[in-house]
Structures are given as C-alpha cells and as structure tokens.
Amino acid sequence: MNNLISYISRQWNYFKNRFFNIVGKSQLNKFMKHIILFGPPGSGKGTQAKQLEKKFNMIHISTGDLFRYEIGNKTPLGIEAQAYMDQGRLVPDEVTIGMLKNRVNKHPEANGFIFDGFPRTIPQSQALDQFLNERGEELSGLISLKVDDEEIVVRLLDRGKTSGRADDASEAVIRKRIEVYNDQTAPVFNYYDDKGKAQEVEGVGTIDEIFNRLSSTIEAL
Ligand code: AMP
C-alpha cells in the first residue's frame, strides 16, 4: 500500500513538474525548490540547514549524516565509508551518488530538498543535475557560506570537544578536509556559477544573522 501511494505521488510530481516546465520556469519554482547549501567543513551548513528545512518546509539531506548513520549501524556501506572519513578523504562518487538518490526517492512528498555536503565533486554535480532532470525538475541554486580556512580550523577543533566525531578531533585530519575541499569541492561552485546558479553569503556572524541572509537569498530564488 505504501509503495502504491509513493508510486502515485512520484508520478504526480513528475507530471506536475513536466507540465510547469513547459508552462514556465517561474511556475515550476513555486512548486519545487532544490538548494545546495555549500561551503567548507565547519562553515555552519548543518546548523543552518536544520532551521531552513523547517522554515521552507523542505527536506534536508546531509550525506555526512547519512554516512555516520550507516557507520553507527555497522552496515557494509558504513564500513566502506569510515575508512575514507577517518582520513578526511571523500567517499567514492558511485557510493555517494547511489546513497543520495535512494534518500531522495524516499521522499516523494517533498516540496524540495536542501542538499548539505553534496555534491562535493564535479561528477557528483553532473549526476545530481541528470537525476533532477529525469524527474522533470532542476536545481534552484547553490548558496555558498564563506568562511576562511583558519576560522574553520578553530571552529572544528572546538566542535571536536563535543561532537564525538573522529574527523573533528585531529588538526591533521581537519587540514586534510580543507585541502580536499579546496582541490575537489570548490570547483563545484564554478560549475554552477557558469550556469548562473551560484551565490555567496557571508558565513561569519551570529547563527540568526546568517540564517536571515540565507532565508532572503532562498526567497529570491
Ligand atoms: P560532513 O559531515 O559533510 O563534513 O562529511 C563528513 C565526511 O563524510 C567527509 O569528510 C567525507 O569523508 C564524507 N562525505 C560526506 N559527503 C560526501 C560526499 N558528497 N562525497 C564524498 N564524501 C562525502
């Protein structure tokens, strides 16, 4: 029964969006907003996404949280991911993309998604675009939280005192994550910028200040 409801709901979303795609993009966006919340580790994506999902009635998907859930349950996926995460490296694209799609497909009722920590490579960005396109949808925009590297190290070492995350506990791993971000993930900003879809927001300030900046950026999309 649940499968049937989910199937009908998926079909309905698909045809609704195909229709509004034809009628006009502005109409489409009224129904679906898909946002990438972007920025280096420790830039506040997770904190902000949790509040934004409530305000905009969207679904927040953090690939880091999904991997930590799998690790907690000692699943084969979790065991594979942990080796990469402990070293501050990226989990391979095929594994990450497959997991992300599964998660999205579990929410046929969603008004839109806030992707946090995904995409982190150009192949992940291409896979996301293709996936949304197959659903008759598209990305509304990427919003990048701007925080400089030294501030990130201070924030993550501080978070490591309470987060229980092994990858926040060591300065060497934190610096590796920043290096991976600059080498492999930062190009994702340019990829969407070339499509006119990327914006930057100042990521330093109080949680409320940053939330207000993000909210008005999303409202304008
Ligand atoms: P996060 O919670 O977003 O800081 O992610 C923690 C770790 O999970 C990262 O350092 C990566 O090892 C892994 N991870 C999370 N998202 C991705 C992704 N999109 N691609 C590859 N690895 C990821």
Image (cartoon, grey):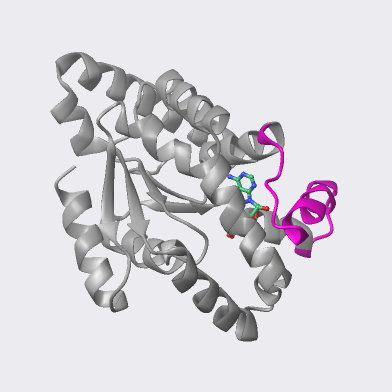
Q: Is residue 1 visible?
A: no
Span shown in magenta: 72-93
Q: Is residue 170 left or right of residue 151?
A: right
Frontmost residue, 153 versus 21: 153
Q: Is residue 83 left or right of residue 12?
A: right
Asked where in the image residue 44 lies, by quadrant, the reply is: bottom left
Quadrant location, the C terminus? top left
Relative to residue 94, is residue 18 depicted above or below?
above
Q: In percent of the image, x 45 and y 73: which residue is there? A: 151
Residue located farthest toward the front when viewing the structure as drawn: 150
Q: Is residue 141 left or right of residue 105?
A: left
Relative to residue 161, is residue 152 depicted above or below?
above
Q: Where does residue 158 sit, x and y in percent of width and height? A: 56, 83
Q: In percent of the image, x 62 and y 63: which residue is there? A: 175
Frontmost residue, 29 versus 177: 177
Q: Is residue 195 visible?
A: yes
Frontmost residue, 86 versus 140: 86
Q: Where does residue 171 sit, x and y in percent of width and height? A: 67, 72
Please tell me whether residue 175 belongs to the stretch shown in magenta: no
Quadrant location, the N terminus? top right
Frontmost residue, 21 versus 157: 157
Q: In percent of the image, x 48 and y 57: which residue is there? A: 40
